[in-house]
Image (cartoon, coloured by chain):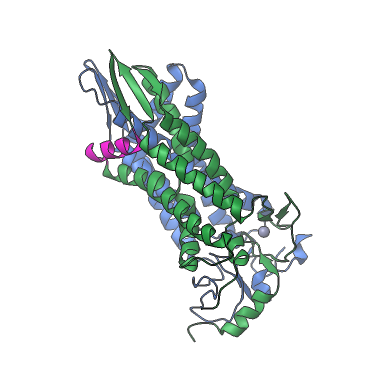
Chain colours: A green, B blue
């Protein structure tokens, strides 16, 4: 037998059960009140949290994050001044420079964790939420949700903001440093991403009912 | 108190690793989650051996990451190769001790603590030790939470390299240490992902 009998696996689905991801303890699900957080009695992991934001709110958040993301990538991050000369860089400037300076691995890492994965995460989330808002399952909902699960830990924009701060302080020793809008956009993005992180994506599976094909 | 809480394994249930759906364990070899079609596992596959392998690989990379310089700063005839540690010291001396502490924590303490934490988790879970299970669970969540902050220095080098292209007066150049460091971070992240925290609670016979 290669796959389980759908009828018997689905039986478990009907019961409002919840399994702690960290220790395998089974709980009966309970609706949470506003701001409530359910914790595992055995291992203290967070099981579920009530989120104030509805689907519409989450969608608005994603759209905002995407706009900020565009700005963070288009605008220069910092400008250095030396003897009247000004030089500035964007994120892509840094990535391309690393590639040229024979650190291709670093440049690929930076491009993936600071550009492609965050972009992927926001577009997939935006796609799923756009349809969820109208009570529909987005085309490719399942693939999008699985991809979101995989991409999750690989977005590092918040680390980049701290890195930029350290780089600025180091550069201050030799140059005049001027902060550009890009770095502020990144700081804003960091805040938005922190809000994202608290959204329980798994809830979307239940929120949007399966539409019969 | 927690002894009488039922575990999915005992009830013949499996929680899907990807979407969290509670499924019945049919005992089939290649079961798939009916909701997200990911393969269902009681525990992450070959968790111990995969985590050990990734951790050892990460540790091997961590040696050149610290010994080799990660960045060269050159100003008028004065070439300065910085390793991670000397970069921290420089930051401290040049007047930003608070940032020096942050970089030290992210680049040196976090990776070392991550190695120690994962080795402790692997070792104690393998022996089915009942010791401090709750704390070990928290330790695992901490490892997952802080792991990627170690990328800090990698981004610093990338940004500085891009910024300082004057050439005439001073330049910044990335050196191989930064590549090893980046690889260490990625490998430790994979290592913590392949560890299954449920193993902490899988006692030999009974739970407590
Ligand atoms: Zn738990």
Q: What residue occupies the far front of the structure in this picture? A: A134
Q: Position of residue A169 (x, y in %)?
A: 42, 22
Q: Is residue A201 magenta?
A: no
Q: How many marks?
A: 0
Q: What residue occupies the far right of the structure in this picture? A: B1
Which of A86/B62 is in front? A86
Q: Could you tell me which residue is drawn at 62 percent across and 59 percent down?
A: A22
Q: On the image, which quarter does residue A192 sit in? A: top right
Q: Could you tell me which residue is drawn at 37 percent across and 41 percent down?
A: B181
From which residue to which does the magenta span run?
A90-103
Q: Position of residue B148 (x, y in %)?
A: 47, 44
Q: Position of residue B189 (x, y in %)?
A: 46, 50
The main secondary structure of the magenta stretch is: helix
Q: Is residue A100 above or below residue B6?
A: above
Q: Is residue A152 above or below residue A102?
A: below
Q: Could you tell me which residue is drawn at 57 percent across and 83 percent down?
A: A6
A64 relative to A7 in the view: left or right: left
Q: Is residue A150 above or below residue B145?
A: below
Q: Position of residue B73 (x, y in %)?
A: 29, 24
A110 relative to B146 in the view: left or right: left
Of the 4 image quadrants, the one containing the C terminus of chain B is bottom right
């Amino acid at each position: 037998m290669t796959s389980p009998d759908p009828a018997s696996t689905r039986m478990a689905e009907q019961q409002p059960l919840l399994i702690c991801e960290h220790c395998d303890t089974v709980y009966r699900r309970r609706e949470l009140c506003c701001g409530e957080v359910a914790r595992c009695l055995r291992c203290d992991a967070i099981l579920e949290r009530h989120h104030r934001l509805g689907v519409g709110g989450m969608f608005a958040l994603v759209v905002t994050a995407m706009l900020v993301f565009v700005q963070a990538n288009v605008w220069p991050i910092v400008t250095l001044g030396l003897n009247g000369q000004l030089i500035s860089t964007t994120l892509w400037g840094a990535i391309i420079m690393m590639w040229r300076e024979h650190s291709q691995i670093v440049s690929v890492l930076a491009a993936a964790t600071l550009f492609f994965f965050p972009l992927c995460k926001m577009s997939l989330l935006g796609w799923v939420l756009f349809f969820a808002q109208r009570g529909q399952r987005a085309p490719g909902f399942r693939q999008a949700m699985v991809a979101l699960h995989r991409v999750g830990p690989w977005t590092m924009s918040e680390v980049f903001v701290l890195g930029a701060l350290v780089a600025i302080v180091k550069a201050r020793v030799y140059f005049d440093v001027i902060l550009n809008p890009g770095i502020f956009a990144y700081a804003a993005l960091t805040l938005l991403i922190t809000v994202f992180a608290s959204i329980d994506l798994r809830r979307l599976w239940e929120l949007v009912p399966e539409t019969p094909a | 108190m927690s002894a009488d809480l039922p575990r999915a394994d005992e009830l013949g249930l499996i929680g899907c690793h990807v979407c969290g759906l509670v499924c019945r364990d049919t005992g089939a070899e290649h079961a798939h989650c009916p909701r997200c079609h990911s393969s269902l596992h009681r525990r992450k596959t070959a968790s111990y051996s995969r985590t050990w392998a990734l951790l050892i690989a990460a540790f091997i990379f961590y040696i050149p990451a610290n010994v080799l310089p990660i960045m060269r700063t050159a100003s008028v005839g004065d070439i300065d190769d910085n390793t991670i540690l000397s970069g921290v010291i420089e930051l401290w001396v040049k007047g930003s001790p608070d940032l020096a502490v942050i970089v030290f924590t992210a680049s040196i303490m976090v990776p070392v603590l991550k190695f120690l934490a994962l080795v402790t988790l692997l070792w104690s879970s393998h022996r089915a030790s009942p010791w401090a299970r709750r704390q070990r669970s928290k330790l695992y969540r901490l490892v997952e939470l802080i792991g990627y902050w170690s990328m800090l220095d990698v981004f610093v080098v990338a940004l500085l390299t891009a910024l300082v292209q004057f050439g005439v007066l001073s330049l910044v150049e990335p050196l191989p240490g930064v590549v090893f460091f980046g690889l260490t971070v990625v490998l430790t992240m994979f290592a913590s992902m392949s560890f299954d925290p449920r193993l902490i609670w899988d006692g030999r016979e009974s739970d407590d």
